[in-house]
């Protein structure tokens, strides 16, 4: 009888473990991308009750924000900021100057042409050019870090002018 009782206890224990593992838990609310639709802190609920993440603390991730553009492109073998990107940089500089605790890394990139050493130097020069622009616009130096990847992290891995023009860039990484 003891053996039958022990087998029964083992079976009951097994069932408790299996059924306990299948028990439902309260689900976390789904977080959808997009601006907040309600005034409840960093999350708001829309009319359907779905939680939406607010971009209040990270406006550079909000597609509707002017800070969303975080890539500055350069001409071949150049570290000169093209005039079309001056307003983009001014927008970021204004934000950084008014948010002194915000930090950004300026990541310099090049296309694949040139030696590794040359491309690292050119990527660094591009990042430093953007840094000098920000400093002139009132951004504090302790908010800025420069980093060069040279040709190591292409945005477009293909070969040809279309890809190369996408790889000659500085990315602002908040």
Image (tube, rainbow, N blue to C red):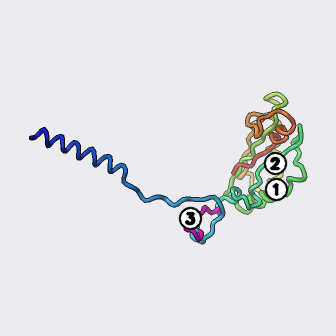
- Distance, label 1 to label 2, CA atoms, is 8 Å
Q: Give yes or no for contact between labels 1 and 2 (Cβ–Cβ under 8 Å).
A: yes
Secondary-structure class at tag 3: loop
Residue 49 lies in the magenta stretch: yes
Mark 2, residue position = 72
Residue at the location (71% across, 48% down)?
A: 173
Q: Is residue 18 magenta?
A: no
Please give the residue where the numbered disc 1 appears in the rendered image: 88
For disc 1, the neighbor class at 10 Å (few under 14, some 14 to 19, many from 20) is some
- Give the x, y percent position of residue 18: 32, 46
Q: Nearer the viewer, mark 1 or mark 3?
A: 3
- x and y, in percent, of residue 10 in the image: 22, 42
Whole-angstrom CA distance, mark 2 to mark 3, is: 35 Å
Quadrant in the rendering for residue 58 = bottom right
The residue located at (81%, 37%) in the rendering is: 110
Residue lying at the far top of the rendered structure: 115
> Going 81% across and 42% down the picture, which residue do you hit?
166
* Residue at image mark 3: 50
Compared with 35, 3 (above or below) is above
Near-viewer residue (100 or 59) = 59
């Amino acid at each position: 009888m003891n053996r039958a009782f022990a087998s029964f206890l083992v079976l009951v224990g097994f069932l408790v473990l299996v059924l306990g593992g299948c028990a439902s838990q309260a689900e976390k609310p789904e977080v959808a991308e997009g601006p907040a639709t309600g005034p409840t802190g960093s999350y708001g609920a829309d009319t359907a009750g779905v939680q939406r993440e607010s971009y209040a603390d990270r406006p550079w991730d909000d597609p509707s924000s002017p800070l969303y553009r975080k890539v500055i492109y350069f001409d071949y073998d150049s570290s000169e900021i093209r005039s079309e990107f001056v307003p983009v940089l001014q927008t970021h500089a204004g934000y950084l100057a008014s948010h002194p605790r915000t930090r950004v890394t300026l990541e310099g990139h090049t296309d694949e042409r040139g030696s590794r050493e040359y491309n690292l130097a050119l990527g660094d020069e591009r990042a430093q050019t953007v840094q000098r622009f920000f400093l002139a616009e009132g951004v504090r130096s302790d908010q800025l870090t420069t980093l060069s990847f040279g040709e190591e992290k292409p945005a477009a891995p293909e070969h040809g002018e279309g890809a190369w023009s996408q790889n000659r860039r500085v990315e602002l990484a908040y």
